[in-house]
Amino acid sequence: MANFPDLLARRLAADPGQPFVTFYDDASGERTELSVQTYSNWVSKTANLFADELMLDPGDDLRIDLPPHWLGVVFLGGLLSCGLGLDDGAPVAIVGPDGVSGGAGLGVATTMACSLRPFAVRFAEPLPPGVLDHGVLWAGQSDVFSPIEPTELDPPTADDRRVITDLNPLSAEGRELVLGLVAGSGSLVLVTNSDDGKWPAHSQSERVTAAVRATG
Protein backbone atom coordinates (compact mmCIF):
# COMPACT_ATOMS: atom_id res chain seq x y z
CA MET A 1 0.00 0.00 0.00
CA ALA A 2 0.98 3.63 -0.42
CA ASN A 3 -0.03 6.90 1.19
CA PHE A 4 -0.10 10.48 0.01
CA PRO A 5 2.46 11.98 2.46
CA ASP A 6 5.08 9.42 1.39
CA LEU A 7 4.40 10.05 -2.30
CA LEU A 8 4.71 13.81 -1.82
CA ALA A 9 7.86 13.44 0.29
CA ARG A 10 9.54 11.62 -2.59
CA ARG A 11 8.59 14.43 -4.97
CA LEU A 12 10.01 16.99 -2.55
CA ALA A 13 13.27 15.11 -2.29
CA ALA A 14 13.56 14.87 -6.08
CA ASP A 15 12.85 18.46 -7.16
CA PRO A 16 11.06 20.81 -4.74
CA GLY A 17 11.22 23.78 -7.12
CA GLN A 18 9.51 22.06 -10.06
CA PRO A 19 6.09 23.51 -10.96
CA PHE A 20 3.39 21.07 -9.90
CA VAL A 21 0.07 22.90 -10.32
CA THR A 22 -0.48 25.71 -12.83
CA PHE A 23 -3.99 27.11 -12.74
CA TYR A 24 -5.85 29.21 -15.30
CA ASP A 25 -9.28 30.79 -14.89
CA ASP A 26 -10.28 31.76 -18.41
CA ALA A 27 -13.14 33.92 -17.10
CA SER A 28 -11.06 36.12 -14.78
CA GLY A 29 -7.63 35.81 -16.41
CA GLU A 30 -6.08 34.48 -13.19
CA ARG A 31 -2.92 32.39 -13.43
CA THR A 32 -1.57 30.74 -10.28
CA GLU A 33 1.40 28.40 -10.06
CA LEU A 34 2.46 26.19 -7.17
CA SER A 35 5.84 24.48 -7.08
CA VAL A 36 6.13 21.07 -5.45
CA GLN A 37 7.42 22.80 -2.29
CA THR A 38 4.65 25.39 -2.24
CA TYR A 39 2.05 22.72 -2.90
CA SER A 40 3.44 20.67 -0.01
CA ASN A 41 3.21 23.69 2.30
CA TRP A 42 -0.40 24.25 1.27
CA VAL A 43 -1.25 20.59 1.87
CA SER A 44 0.25 20.74 5.37
CA LYS A 45 -1.63 23.95 6.22
CA THR A 46 -4.84 22.38 4.94
CA ALA A 47 -4.32 19.16 6.88
CA ASN A 48 -3.75 21.17 10.06
CA LEU A 49 -6.87 23.22 9.30
CA PHE A 50 -8.94 20.05 8.84
CA ALA A 51 -7.63 18.51 12.06
CA ASP A 52 -7.44 21.53 14.34
CA GLU A 53 -10.06 24.00 13.08
CA LEU A 54 -12.69 21.65 11.64
CA MET A 55 -11.98 19.00 14.33
CA LEU A 56 -11.94 16.12 11.87
CA ASP A 57 -10.44 12.77 12.83
CA PRO A 58 -9.14 9.94 10.62
CA GLY A 59 -12.13 8.11 9.21
CA ASP A 60 -14.38 11.17 9.16
CA ASP A 61 -15.99 12.45 5.98
CA LEU A 62 -16.43 15.91 4.57
CA ARG A 63 -18.25 17.36 1.62
CA ILE A 64 -16.39 19.57 -0.86
CA ASP A 65 -18.49 21.41 -3.43
CA LEU A 66 -16.11 23.46 -5.56
CA PRO A 67 -15.60 23.98 -9.29
CA PRO A 68 -12.27 22.86 -10.82
CA HIS A 69 -9.72 24.94 -8.89
CA TRP A 70 -6.17 24.71 -7.60
CA LEU A 71 -7.57 24.61 -4.07
CA GLY A 72 -9.23 21.34 -5.03
CA VAL A 73 -5.79 19.80 -5.63
CA VAL A 74 -4.69 21.14 -2.24
CA PHE A 75 -7.80 19.85 -0.46
CA LEU A 76 -7.31 16.42 -2.01
CA GLY A 77 -3.81 16.25 -0.54
CA GLY A 78 -5.04 17.51 2.81
CA LEU A 79 -7.85 15.02 3.20
CA LEU A 80 -5.68 12.07 2.15
CA SER A 81 -3.00 13.18 4.61
CA CYS A 82 -5.62 13.21 7.40
CA GLY A 83 -7.28 9.93 6.49
CA LEU A 84 -10.55 11.62 5.54
CA GLY A 85 -13.17 10.65 3.00
CA LEU A 86 -15.54 12.54 0.72
CA ASP A 87 -19.29 12.14 1.18
CA ASP A 88 -22.08 14.41 -0.08
CA GLY A 89 -23.96 13.74 3.15
CA ALA A 90 -21.11 14.66 5.52
CA PRO A 91 -21.80 17.11 8.36
CA VAL A 92 -18.84 19.31 7.35
CA ALA A 93 -19.05 21.14 4.02
CA ILE A 94 -16.58 23.22 2.03
CA VAL A 95 -18.24 25.44 -0.55
CA GLY A 96 -17.36 28.25 -2.93
CA PRO A 97 -19.09 31.61 -3.37
CA ASP A 98 -21.98 30.03 -5.26
CA GLY A 99 -22.57 27.67 -2.35
CA VAL A 100 -22.87 30.58 0.05
CA SER A 101 -25.20 32.64 -2.12
CA GLY A 102 -27.30 29.62 -3.03
CA GLY A 103 -27.43 28.26 0.49
CA ALA A 104 -25.68 24.98 -0.39
CA GLY A 105 -24.00 23.47 2.63
CA LEU A 106 -25.50 26.00 5.03
CA GLY A 107 -27.72 23.44 6.72
CA VAL A 108 -24.88 21.21 7.89
CA ALA A 109 -23.08 21.31 11.24
CA THR A 110 -20.00 23.13 9.92
CA THR A 111 -19.54 25.09 6.70
CA MET A 112 -16.28 26.61 5.48
CA ALA A 113 -16.48 28.85 2.42
CA CYS A 114 -13.72 29.66 -0.08
CA SER A 115 -13.78 32.97 -1.92
CA LEU A 116 -11.88 31.44 -4.89
CA ARG A 117 -10.19 34.82 -5.29
CA PRO A 118 -6.49 34.95 -6.27
CA PHE A 119 -4.12 33.93 -3.46
CA ALA A 120 -7.06 32.33 -1.60
CA VAL A 121 -7.81 35.58 0.21
CA ARG A 122 -10.84 36.11 2.44
CA PHE A 123 -14.26 37.17 1.22
CA ALA A 124 -14.66 40.88 0.59
CA GLU A 125 -18.06 40.91 2.34
CA PRO A 126 -19.09 39.33 5.66
CA LEU A 127 -20.29 35.74 5.45
CA PRO A 128 -23.56 34.50 6.98
CA PRO A 129 -23.35 33.84 10.73
CA GLY A 130 -21.62 30.57 11.53
CA VAL A 131 -19.92 30.19 8.13
CA LEU A 132 -16.14 29.98 8.39
CA ASP A 133 -13.96 31.91 5.94
CA HIS A 134 -11.20 29.71 4.52
CA GLY A 135 -9.23 32.84 3.60
CA VAL A 136 -9.07 33.82 7.27
CA LEU A 137 -8.23 30.37 8.61
CA TRP A 138 -5.56 28.96 6.32
CA ALA A 139 -2.90 31.63 6.86
CA GLY A 140 -2.48 30.84 10.55
CA GLN A 141 -1.88 27.13 10.03
CA SER A 142 1.54 25.53 10.33
CA ASP A 143 3.18 24.33 7.14
CA VAL A 144 4.39 21.23 8.99
CA PHE A 145 1.95 18.35 9.49
CA SER A 146 2.64 14.96 11.07
CA PRO A 147 0.19 12.41 9.65
CA ILE A 148 -1.30 9.96 12.15
CA GLU A 149 -3.45 7.75 9.95
CA PRO A 150 -3.20 8.87 6.31
CA THR A 151 -5.45 7.19 3.78
CA GLU A 152 -4.06 3.92 2.47
CA LEU A 153 -3.86 3.95 -1.31
CA ASP A 154 -3.27 1.39 -3.98
CA PRO A 155 0.11 2.42 -5.43
CA PRO A 156 -0.75 4.81 -8.28
CA THR A 157 0.84 4.41 -11.69
CA ALA A 158 3.60 7.01 -11.94
CA ASP A 159 2.80 9.71 -14.49
CA ASP A 160 5.64 11.86 -15.85
CA ARG A 161 3.56 13.96 -18.24
CA ARG A 162 2.72 17.65 -18.07
CA VAL A 163 -1.05 17.40 -18.42
CA ILE A 164 -3.51 20.14 -19.28
CA THR A 165 -7.03 19.38 -18.08
CA ASP A 166 -10.37 20.86 -17.10
CA LEU A 167 -11.25 17.92 -14.85
CA ASN A 168 -12.31 18.65 -11.30
CA PRO A 169 -9.40 17.30 -9.22
CA LEU A 170 -11.89 16.07 -6.61
CA SER A 171 -13.73 13.85 -9.10
CA ALA A 172 -12.76 10.20 -9.36
CA GLU A 173 -10.95 10.76 -12.67
CA GLY A 174 -9.32 13.95 -11.44
CA ARG A 175 -8.12 12.30 -8.24
CA GLU A 176 -6.56 9.43 -10.21
CA LEU A 177 -4.77 11.92 -12.45
CA VAL A 178 -3.39 13.99 -9.57
CA LEU A 179 -2.16 10.96 -7.65
CA GLY A 180 -0.37 9.61 -10.71
CA LEU A 181 1.39 12.94 -11.23
CA VAL A 182 2.45 13.07 -7.57
CA ALA A 183 3.77 9.52 -7.80
CA GLY A 184 5.75 10.31 -10.94
CA SER A 185 7.52 13.47 -12.02
CA GLY A 186 4.57 15.02 -13.84
CA SER A 187 2.65 18.24 -13.35
CA LEU A 188 -0.83 19.64 -13.85
CA VAL A 189 -2.12 22.58 -15.88
CA LEU A 190 -5.66 23.02 -14.61
CA VAL A 191 -8.10 25.22 -16.54
CA THR A 192 -11.45 26.37 -15.18
CA ASN A 193 -14.20 28.23 -17.04
CA SER A 194 -12.40 26.85 -20.05
CA ASP A 195 -12.45 28.88 -23.25
CA ASP A 196 -11.70 26.53 -26.15
CA GLY A 197 -10.19 29.44 -28.04
CA LYS A 198 -7.51 29.84 -25.35
CA TRP A 199 -6.77 26.14 -24.93
CA PRO A 200 -4.10 25.95 -27.68
CA ALA A 201 -2.27 29.00 -26.27
CA HIS A 202 -2.25 27.50 -22.78
CA SER A 203 -0.96 24.22 -24.18
CA GLN A 204 1.83 25.91 -26.09
CA SER A 205 2.95 28.36 -23.41
CA GLU A 206 2.95 25.69 -20.70
CA ARG A 207 4.67 23.10 -22.91
CA VAL A 208 2.16 20.41 -22.08
CA THR A 209 2.69 16.87 -23.29
CA ALA A 210 -0.86 15.53 -22.84
CA ALA A 211 -4.45 16.73 -22.54
CA VAL A 212 -7.35 15.24 -20.60
CA ARG A 213 -10.75 16.85 -21.17
CA ALA A 214 -13.81 16.48 -18.98
CA THR A 215 -16.75 14.78 -20.64
CA GLY A 216 -20.42 15.51 -20.19
Image: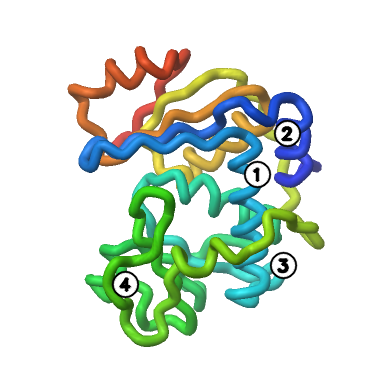
Q: Which residue is mark 2?
A: 12
Few, some or many residues within 10 Å of mark 2 (<14, 14–19, 20+): some
Few, some or many residues within 10 Å of mark 4 (<14, 14–19, 20+): some
Q: Which residue is mark 4?
A: 104
Disc 4 secondary structure class: loop
Mark in the foreground, 4 or 2: 2
Few, some or many residues within 10 Å of mark 3 (<14, 14–19, 20+): some
Q: Are marks 4 and 3 in contact (CB under 8 Å)?
A: no
Q: Amino acid at mark 4?
A: Ala
Few, some or many residues within 10 Å of mark 1 (<14, 14–19, 20+): many
Q: Which residue is mark 1?
A: 40
In this view, the residue in front, 139 or 157, is 139
Q: Position of residue 72 (x, y in %)?
A: 47, 49
Q: Amino acid at mark 1?
A: Ser
Residue at image location 48% in from the left, 80% down from the top: 110
Q: Position of residue 5 (x, y in %)?
A: 74, 46
N-term mark: 4 or 3: 3
Q: Amino acid at mark 2?
A: Leu
Q: Amino acid at mark 3?
A: Pro
Q: Does 41 sit above or below residue 115?
A: above
Q: Are marks 1 and 4 in contact (CB under 8 Å)?
A: no
Q: CA distance from mark 4 to mark 3?
A: 25 Å
Q: Which residue is mark 3?
A: 58
